[in-house]
């Protein structure tokens, strides 16, 4: 399949196809980051929490590519496609978590901190799914 697609392609077309495939890998990481970022490793330090979230998101996206890549992406290439996106997400999450991190001895009276209960994260995910389902129902009718 790739031989036929790349046979008459110019270098810019090849670069666009590569960029599209890497963007697909990044985009498939995002739903997993949304779920795992709210439920996994909530009490870990910023580096560990970012690693847990990004690595599990990468694993989910890689499994999607392996099992649903079809003829477009060979099985040996499927785990590599979401890797650049997962690395970008890791560094972004690590930076975000570091900015929001407060040591226990730095917490003052009246300071609000993020909820670290995984059940609240599940509630947010369910609420987002219900809102999406309602939107789909109203758009289709």
Image (tube, rainbow, N blue to C red):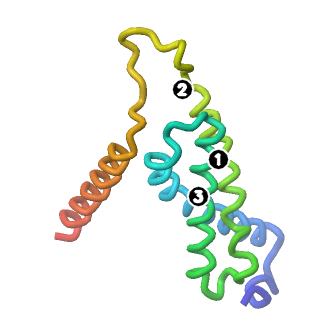
Residue beneath the point at 79% across and 79% down: 9
Q: Residues within 10 Å of mark 3 (few under 14, many from 20)?
A: some
Q: Earlier in the sequence, mark 1 or mark 3?
A: 1
> What's the CA distance linking mark 1 and mark 3?
8 Å
| Residue at far top of view | 109
Answer with left or right where residue 101 lies relative to residue 15: left
Q: Which mark is residue 51?
A: 1
| Residue linked to disc 3 | 56
Residue beneath the point at 69% across and 75% down: 78
- Residue 87 at what x, y percent from top left? 70, 51
> What's the CA distance linking mark 2 and mark 3?
22 Å
Answer with left or right where residue 98 lies relative to residue 120: right
| Residue at far left of view | 141
Quarter in which the C terminus is drawn: bottom left
Closest to the camera, between mark 1 and mark 2, is: 1
Q: Residues within 10 Å of mark 1 (few under 14, many from 20)?
A: some
Above or below for 83 versus 122: below
Above or below for 8 versus 54: below
Q: Nearer the viewer, residue 33 or 121?
A: 121
Q: Which mark is residue 97?
A: none
- Residue 108 at what x, y percent from top left? 44, 9
Q: The residue tagged with tag 3: helix, strand or loop?
A: helix
- Residue 2 at what x, y percent from top left? 75, 85
Quarter in which the N terminus is drawn: bottom right
Residue beneath the point at 81% across and 74% down: 10
Residue beneath the point at 70% across and 82% down: 75
- Residue 102 at what x, y percent from top left? 54, 21
| Residue linked to disc 2 | 100
Q: Nearer the viewer, residue 50 or 26?
A: 50
> What's the CA distance linking mark 1 and mark 2?
16 Å
Q: Nearer the viewer, residue 129 or 22?
A: 129
């Amino acid at each position: 399949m790739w031989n036929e697609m790349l046979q008459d392609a110019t270098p810019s077309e090849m670069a666009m196809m590569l960029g599209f495939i890497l963007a697909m890998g990044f985009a498939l990481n995002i739903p997993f980051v949304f779920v795992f970022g709210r439920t996994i490793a909530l009490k870990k330090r910023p580096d560990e929490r970012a690693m847990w979230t990004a690595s599990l998101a990468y694993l989910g996206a890689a499994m999607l590519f392996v099992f649903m890549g079809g003829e477009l992406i060979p099985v040996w290439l499927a785990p590599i496609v979401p890797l650049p996106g997962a690395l970008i997400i890791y560094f972004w999450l690590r930076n975000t978590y570091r900015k929001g991190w407060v040591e226990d001895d730095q917490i003052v009276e009246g300071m609000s901190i993020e909820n670290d209960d995984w059940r609240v994260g599940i509630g947010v995910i369910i609420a987002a799914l219900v809102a999406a389902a309602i939107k789909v129902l109203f758009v289709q009718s």
